[in-house]
């Protein structure tokens, strides 16, 4: 298949100034008439033919300046429409296509979800609606007329502002016209038609303009959209306050649909969401769901400036909008909730997803240099590592320069399709710093490893830190160069006081930039042995190897002023023990006790002051984290045993504390999703998990009672999740009851699927196969497939990686089945195989065989073909 390369970029030969779309909705024969005002691009090749993109299109008519084209004047296929000799000045092209939205199972272009019509155009879905220059650097203004049967689609929505609506005479049809005055690329186009309930609110922007905010959902679920609407309003206020960005249309609409390939989409003025990220009620959504809704509502809204007003020149620049917008939504959530707690959550995701990807055959730079299928590059690397780059930039140049740089970027690039270079240039200019070395973060893939050795000279009163960095080889990049790594650091005395010591390379904010392969810092005036606190707040996306003994790390858990590093210290010690146990080493009771005791004294002093933070400290690294740490010849069964063993040992030592929290933090008053209340539930449920690990009978009794009597989904699901770790009749009974209770709530059934798919026992594979026959399951719905199959493959380390290979064979068969319906969904599932090379040899061979089976199948989609070949490479 064809490879698209960044170095081959050239401007389009034609530009499209305006688009008039006339869409007449029909379940199987939707008519689309597109009227495009086209002109040659002064930066393009003069005299070139006009080649428009298509994808599975059915052309009905084509006319140029009102005249039907003769056969020899154009060439058409489902994939493209070429006008051989277009006029040398502006002209009007009218193209008619017919679509079958009901048959569209790929969920790209125009499709139906629960009978409603909706669209998804990013990255290349607009070409499934009409022939177009479907590339992000072609910006046009759009007018959309949507017509539909009144009963089938009483609500008709488009981009921009509503300008007209009415009845179609002599029929039961009606129409609406929408006008979007802001030039946009085709990937931001959207329309919706359907039967939908609505909640709304008016908002006044900072300059006093009124905007009508509305969220459309399945009728009857309107009250479940209240939280999302509130989050939208808070996002708008925040973007005005923190970035000075104001909204720019009269309306802002969000539509929730139940069949969606990803989380949500930032179409101009008409965001379309996976309903999982809109709908919430205390009975159906967990605290984590509420937090995700808030973050994704914010993310899509923030795209209005970072993505829509300033868009991307080409898809290689995807991180320009995605990394930056993730950074913005992370900052928003940190301001709305608890900054350190949110930072820890971000880093946990980064490590679990992006570090994993970076060490896998699918590793790629934040700005890739080539692709076969762009949809495979909406990755943790582009999104999450992309956000880390923006955060490092802010750390390096400081808050004030960062804000001025953002202002300059908006001012200069508004209304354009920009590049990473344009972005960096704004910051280089306002800060007066060269960012050319820093720019390597966009080019070089792989996670840098920083090793630090410490030396204390008591007589001289000096303390030295020797840093070295290296980045492992990744596909296409065998040799790596040193990166510019911001290290935020401080020294902590053993009694907890902070050590004021001088070092010339560290600025007054505690920032040191490691930009060479090796460098040393010498602190003077150090009167007693300090403990270094490095990479405070996780100041760079790197792996750190530190020569500190566990006792010293535990000083940080108790005393560091940086909350992230307090958590990190506990994780590092836990990980050392877990990796040793997994590798079959004995870890003495004294060593585990020392760790448990440190946790107990932390719980005595701090836990109830910040329960959300305490819950994170009490949660051991996951089995997948441990596998990644070990990195090769991984035996997931050994890891599972090691982690269970350590949970049991901690649970025993800390039993009194855990029981006390479980009592004291019991649910009181009505449910509220705010961060403080969520934190109390998190600590109580983390306590329950450890209680159950140490004492099965006590755990089972508490969890069964909680699963039965909980007044909200967070507590009910947490209890059920604890029960899934305890085989027996109580568990099966609780699972059955939960399934009965929520059988008409698809999003809750997803949680039910996930919990069962994650049970680390041998009969889980059969259970999962059985659940595929459940009436609530559907292979065509991405949420259902991800909840059941995706969770089995991504969360259940021991059963997906079964030593008999049955887990791999199962996933391979589902990937092939799903690929025929929905290639994007299939390709996502397939990425679960990206860890196959780290497994021990028996599993590795099984995985490789399963991958070969996939790769040999004829007519694979480009999505799956690309992932399978890179995974095997
Ligand atoms: N921009 C969309 C993602 C589109 C994915 C296309 N395969 C959502 C987001 O990042 O906000
Ligand atoms: Zn985004």
Image (spheres, grey):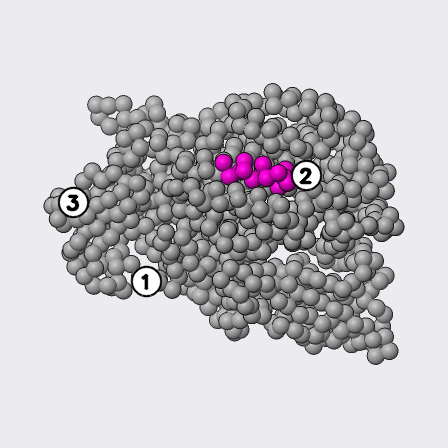
Determine which residue is flagged by label 3: 63
Of the two numbered discs 1 and 3 on the same chain, state the one appearing first in sequence.
1
Residue at x-position 52% and y-position 22%: 775
Secondary structure, mark 3, is: strand
Determine which residue is flagged by label 2: 678
Residue at x-position 53% and y-position 65%: 478
Q: Nearer the viewer, mark 1 or mark 3?
A: 1
Asked if the residues shown at circle 1 and circle 3 are in contact, with their CB atoms under 8 angstroms apart, the answer is: no
> Dividing the picture into quarters, in which one does residue 487 lie?
bottom right
Of the two numbered discs 3 and 2 on the same chain, state the one appearing first in sequence.
3
How many numbered badges does the structure rendering display?
3
Principal secondary structure, stretch drawn in magenta: helix
Of the two numbered discs 2 and 1 on the same chain, state the one appearing first in sequence.
1
The image position of residue 234, as x and y in percent, is 54, 44
Task: Residue 595: give its label.
Answer: none
| Res. 333 in view | no
Determine which residue is flagged by label 1: 10
Q: Nearer the viewer, mark 3 or mark 2?
A: 3
- Classify residue 344 as left or right of residue 691: left
Residue at x-position 26% and y-position 59%: 13
Note whether ligand 1 is within 8 Å of mark 3.
no
Q: Nearer the viewer, mark 2 or mark 1?
A: 1
Residue lying farthest to the right in this orientation = 590
- Looking at the rendering, the stretch of residues picked out in magenta corresponds to 799-813
Secondary structure, mark 1, is: loop
Residue lying farthest to the bottom in this orientation = 460
Magenta-colored stretch includes residue 810: yes
The image position of residue 2, as x and y in percent, is 36, 54
């Amino acid at each position: 298949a064809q490879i698209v390369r960044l170095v081959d970029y050239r401007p389009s030969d034609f530009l499209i100034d305006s688009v008039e779309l006339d869409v007449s909705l029909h379940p199987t024969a939707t008519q689309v008439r597109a009227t495009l005002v086209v002109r040659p691009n002064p930066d393009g090749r003069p005299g070139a033919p006009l080649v428009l993109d298509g994808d599975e299109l059915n052309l009905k008519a084509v006319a140029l300046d009102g005249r039907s084209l003769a056969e020899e004047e154009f060439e058409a296929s489902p994939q493209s429409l070429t006008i051989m000799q277009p006029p040398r000045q502006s002209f009007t092209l009218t193209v008619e296509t017919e679509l079958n939205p009901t048959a569209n199972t790929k969920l790209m272009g125009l499709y139906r979800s629960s009978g409603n019509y909706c669209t998804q155009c990013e990255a290349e879905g607009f070409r499934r609606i009409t022939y177009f220059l479907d590339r992000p650097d072609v910006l046009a203004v759009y007018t959309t007329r949507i017509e539909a049967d009144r009963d089938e689609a009483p609500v008709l929505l488009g981009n921009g502002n509503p300008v007209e609506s009415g009845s179609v005479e002599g029929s039961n049809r009606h129409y609406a016209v929408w006008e979007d005055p802001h030039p946009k690329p085709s990937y931001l186009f959207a329309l919706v038609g359907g039967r939908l309930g609505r909640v709304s609110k008016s908002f006044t922007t900072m300059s006093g303009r009124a905007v009508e905010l509305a969220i459309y959902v399945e009728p009857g679920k309107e009250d479940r959209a209240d939280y999302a609407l509130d989050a939208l309003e808070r996002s708008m206020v925040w973007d005005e306050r923190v970035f000075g960005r104001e909204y720019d249309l009269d309306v802002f609409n969000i539509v929730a649909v139940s069949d969606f390939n990803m989380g949500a989409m930032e179409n101009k003025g008409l965001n379309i969401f996976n309903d999982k990220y809109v709908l919430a009620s205390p009975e159906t959504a967990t605290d984590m769901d509420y937090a995700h809704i808030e973050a994704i509502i914010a993310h899509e809204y923030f795209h209005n400036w970072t993505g829509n007003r300033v868009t991307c020149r080409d898809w290689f620049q995807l991180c320009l909008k995605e990394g930056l917008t993730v950074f913005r939504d992370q900052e928003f959530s940190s301001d709305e909730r608890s900054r350190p707690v949110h930072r820890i959550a971000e880093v946990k995701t980064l490590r679990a997803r992006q570090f994993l990807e970076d060490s896998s055959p699918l590793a790629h730079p934040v700005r890739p240099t080539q692709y076969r299928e762009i949809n495979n590059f909406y990755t943790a690397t582009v999104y999450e590592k992309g956000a880390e780059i923006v955060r490092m930039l802010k750390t390096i140049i400081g808050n004030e320069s960062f804000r001025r740089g953002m202002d300059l970027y908006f001012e200069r690039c508004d209304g354009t399709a920009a590049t990473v270079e344009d972005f960096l240039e704004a910051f280089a200019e306002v800060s007066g710093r060269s960012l050319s070395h820093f720019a390597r973060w966009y080019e070089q893939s792989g996670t840098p490893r920083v090793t630090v050795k410490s030396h204390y000279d008591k007589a001289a009163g000096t303390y030295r830190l020797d840093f070295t960095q290296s980045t492992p080889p990744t596909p296409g990049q065998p040799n790596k160069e040193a990166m510019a790594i911001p290290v935020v650091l401080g020294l902590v005395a053993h009694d907890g006081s902070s050590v004021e010591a001088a070092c010339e390379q560290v600025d007054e904010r505690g920032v040191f930039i490691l930009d060479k392969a090796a460098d040393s810092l010498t602190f003077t005036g150090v009167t007693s042995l300090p403990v270094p606190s490095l990479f405070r707040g996780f100041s760079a996306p790197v792996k750190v190897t530190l020569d500190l003994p566990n006792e010293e790390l535990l000083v940080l858990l108790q005393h560091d002023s940086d909350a992230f590093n307090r958590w990190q210290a506990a994780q590092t010690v836990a990980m050392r023990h877990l990796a040793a146990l997994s590798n079959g080493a004995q870890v003495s009771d004294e060593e585990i006790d020392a760790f448990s005791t440190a946790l107990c004294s932390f719980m005595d002093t701090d836990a109830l002051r910040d329960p959300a933070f305490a819950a994170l400290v009490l949660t051991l690294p996951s089995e997948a984290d441990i596998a990644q740490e070990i990195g090769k010849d991984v035996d997931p069964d050994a890891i599972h045993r090691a982690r269970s063993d350590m949970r049991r040992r901690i649970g025993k030592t800390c039993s009194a504390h855990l029981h006390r929290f479980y009592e004291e933090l019991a649910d009181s008053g009505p449910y509220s999703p705010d961060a403080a209340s969520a934190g109390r539930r998190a600590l109580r449920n983390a306590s329950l998990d450890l209680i159950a690990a140490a004492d099965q009978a006590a755990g089972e009794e508490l969890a069964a009672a909680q699963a039965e009597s909980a007044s909200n989904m967070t507590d009910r699901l947490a209890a059920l999740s604890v029960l899934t770790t305890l085989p027996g009749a109580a568990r099966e009974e609780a699972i059955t009851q939960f399934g009965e209770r929520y059988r008409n709530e698809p999003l809750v059934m997803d949680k039910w699927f996930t919990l069962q798919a994650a049970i680390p026992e041998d009969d889980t594979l059969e259970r999962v196969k059985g659940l595929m026959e459940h009436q609530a399951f559907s292979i065509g719905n991405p949420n259902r497939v991800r909840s059941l199959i995706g969770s089995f493959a991504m969360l259940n380390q021991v059963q997906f990686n079964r030593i008999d290979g049955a887990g791999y064979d199962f996933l391979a068969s589902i990937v092939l089945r799903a690929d025929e319906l929905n290639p994007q969904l299939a390709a996502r599932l397939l990425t679960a195989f990206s860890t196959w090379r780290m497994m021990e040899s028996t599993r590795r061979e099984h995985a490789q065989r399963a991958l070969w089976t996939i790769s040999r199948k004829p007519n694979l989609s480009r999505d799956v073909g690309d992932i399978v070949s890179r995974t095997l490479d």
